[in-house]
Image (tube, rainbow, N blue to C red):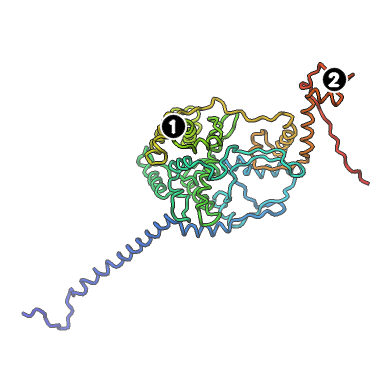
Amino acid sequence: MPLIRPYKGEEPEFPFYRMRTPRLLWFIPILIMIGIITVFAVLVRDEMHTSKLQAEWITYYDRLIHYDLKPGPNQAMRYPDDGPYNHRLGYSYLPFFVKSLAADNYIVAAQARTSAMYDYFVDRGLYPIYHAKTATGLALYDRDGRPVYSASYPAHLFTDFDSIPPVLVNTLLYIENRDLMKPGAPTHNPVVEWRRFFYASFGHLMQKFVPRLNTGGGSTLATQIEKFRYSPNGETHNAKDKLLQIASASLRVYLDGPDTEKAGKQLVLDYLNSTTLGARPGFGEINSIGDGLWAWFGIDLNAANIALNLPDDPDSLRVKAHVYRAALGLILAQRRPTYYFSTGHSALDDLTDTTLDRLASAGVITPTLRDATKAASFRFLAEPPPLPQPPYIEQKATNAMRTHLLTMLGLTKFYELDRLDLAARTTLDEPTQHNMVDFLKKMGNRDFLQVNGLYGFRLLDPENDPTKIKWSVVIYEKRHRRK
């Protein structure tokens, strides 16, 4: 029988070519899919490391966010509702202030007009996008624009990134945001650490099955700043709040362009200068590491900077370790300041010692500094340092103006007024006020009174103590008569 049968015009029931062709075609879609997934994974991986697409896209939208000051009120003005920062600086109360001042015959001379892109993001729940002020407070000026009174909160601030001791920067980054200052692409988005973000997201999902699972946190310095400035009550309540923080912070860090190296340093500076650290009776709200060192430990920020820049030699370690323990304690206590600074002193001690071991193991601090800092202890002040109080006579005019502002704005306390982002011009003449105060101070001096002939019949008696006499002065203003 021949091996190959002749073709008789009938097609075989299972021809060879039909058996192989479907199998070959079956692999083609799989290979295409694998290729697409591989390319996509490479692009995503590159984007996570460089953020090039984000930088280009977000910077484009940032260019469309702008503001113009124009005469008259803006009837379509969008005022922020929530956020400790907006409440403290008075932005949330602007509609109330405008109405209160209108009742006192004031009008809105000029107000900002925002761009359509700004309104678009705010209408979708994002926080206002601009470079926020770190220190603000009431400022009063005389009729010629000379300063009469100025309040600044926080009061103790690092002036710029270079003024922060490196050991403090490295400690903060290790605890809160390890990838922020690492060398890499200049366009990298510092708002998200992707590994921590995915780990925290997966952990929150797993908590539904394992409630006690410690998921860790995915927050960076950028999202924490957004949280304690703009989130309701300074807290993250749900996933939506977290996404709003990420989106708002991403728009904010690219405001000056796609290069985020400068923005990363600014995040460190802003965090240290505005992080919330509870409040103390007699001092008030504490919103910076500098104010925290002063209010809780009585350490001046300038002295702290000098101490933290000292070498780790035996002569310097005692001073450096004392200040470093206080600064580290403030950074660690930021998430629960009320507890750690009231009843949780021992818990803060334990947490600090544990963190010191981790910092030394990671090479952030030397073993010598670790041991010296462990040997040191927190020296909490029983009471905050007293606030400087100028003589009453020097404050009389400004206090009268501040009291008038309280009435005009519908506020009740100087504490609230002084923390507003507010500047006001008065009819007061500062040189005249200064000369009048100087004159009244001299009225407590016997020699000055004697020279000016205030001793004698029906005048002062030599036995009178001039320092106990209350003087009042009436000032007349000479004005040109109208013809």
Quadrant for residue 102, please give it: top right
The residue that label 2 is drawn on is 460
Residue sitting at x 27%, y 66%:
27
Count residues near mark 1 (Cα–Cα under 10 Å), then give few for <14, some for 14-19, many for 20+.
Answer: few
State the SS at label 2: loop
Q: CA distance from mark 1 to mark 2?
A: 65 Å
Task: Judge the density around disc 2: few (<14), some (14-19), many (≥20) Cα neighbours within 10 Å.
Answer: some
Measured as percent of width and height from the top left, residue 214 is found at: 38, 39
**Residue, disc 1:** 314
Q: Amino acid at mark 1?
A: Pro
Where residue 165 sits: x, y (%)? 50, 41
Between circles 1 and 2, the one closer to the viewer is 1
In the rendered view, would you say 348 is above or below 99?
above
Asked if the residues shown at circle 1 and circle 2 are in contact, with their CB atoms under 8 angstroms apart, the answer is no
Which residue is drawn at the image coordinates 44% and 32% (left, top)? 314
Tell me where residue 312 appears, x and y as whole percent.
44, 36
